[in-house]
Amino acid sequence: MSEIPSALATRTGDAPDAPLLSVVVPIYDEEENLRPLHQALTEALRSFGSRCEIIFVDDGSRDRSFALAAEIARDDPRVRVLRLRRNSGQTAAMAAGIAEAAGEIIVPIDADLQNDPVDIERLVAKLGEGYDVVSGWRKERQDGGLTRRIPSRVANWLISRMTGVALHDYGCSLKAYRADVVKRLRLYGEMHRFIPAYAALEGAAVTEIPVRHHPRRAGRSKYGLSRTLKVILDLLVLKFLGTFGTRPIHFFGTTGAALCLAGILAALETLWERFLYSGHTWVHNNPFILLAVFLFLAGVQLIMMGLLAEIGIRTFHEAAGRAPYSIRERVGGGKRGSLDR
């Protein structure tokens, strides 16, 4: 394509040289891949001209990655480099790059050259069809079957089922986001892979397209089976936040009430046996009375936790000035009231 894709040609009133596309590249010990990656990005982003920027985020690399990225930035005015004080993980590095990005559309990409920068233009063009998030799908993966593909398929199926956002490849870093959607999100742990699901919770339109995937040519992979447990735990957090994030009392209160009811039923069973087998069964010797006390107290504790969580979540929203909703657009009538935050 010889001109800026229509998905980017939507702003009015911007400075002529303001970036419309921001490419965020987390880096951790990738010195052998940086210059080939920069060259590939330069070729792939040629149609965007000066209306794009590349943000390298060095995540505490132990090799010469930062020095090489700084050299590239001195030679290419479109390149900026962030250096984290320590290795904070891919999610933190990606969040730092997203926060610094000035473009209307933000595209993260791995530094290992397994993702192909040529696909960036296709992702951006897909956004022009009305989507807020376009996820890359490595349909023909070029890495290990046992340690990468099988766990990935299981994780993608589980995430899709639990979040209701069906994607083939949550683990693919190559995605395109509208900045006004992704900048609202706060990312922790290993949450970067769940950005499409978080965005969908905000009302974003999400889709996916197949993208190229190449074997790693240099460096060493930082992924392995050890991340599987982290993904599962983060998925539980996502599910809880998505379903009960603004109403925790519904989770804790419902569970607590069920336990209290079970405790009352166990107590009634104890009384039933006491009067049915009068003289043969004593309450203090009946295990059901212990179960009744345990269940009832556990239920009360959960209800109290729910009340405390409600106070906490309401305090958070009030202190942060955040509204529990997100407005996509306004039509007609001029600007009234305050914007959502």
Image (cartoon, rainbow, N blue to C red):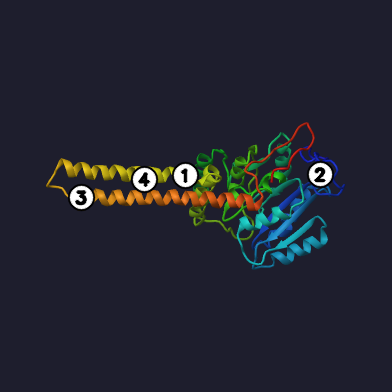
Q: Nearer the viewer, residue 49 or 262?
A: 262
166 is higher (above) or lower (below) than 79: above
Q: Name the mark nearer the viewer: 3 or 4.
A: 3
Tag nearer the camera, 1 or 2: 1
Q: Secondary structure at mark 3?
A: helix
Q: Which residue is tagged 4?
A: 259
The residues tagged by marks 3 and 4 sit, at their Cα atoms, a distance apart of 21 Å
Cα gap from disc 3 to disc 2, whole angstroms: 81 Å
Give, as a three-letter code, the residue at label 3.
Val
Which comes sooner in the sequence, label 3 or label 2?
Answer: 2
Residue type for callout 4: Leu
Q: Identify which residue, 227 or 313, lies in the foreground.
A: 313
What numbered label is drawn on residue 47? Answer: 2
Q: CA distance from mark 4 to mark 2?
A: 62 Å
User: Could you tell me residue 23's position as x and y percent?
Assistant: 73, 51
Q: Is 59 in front, or is 340?
A: 340
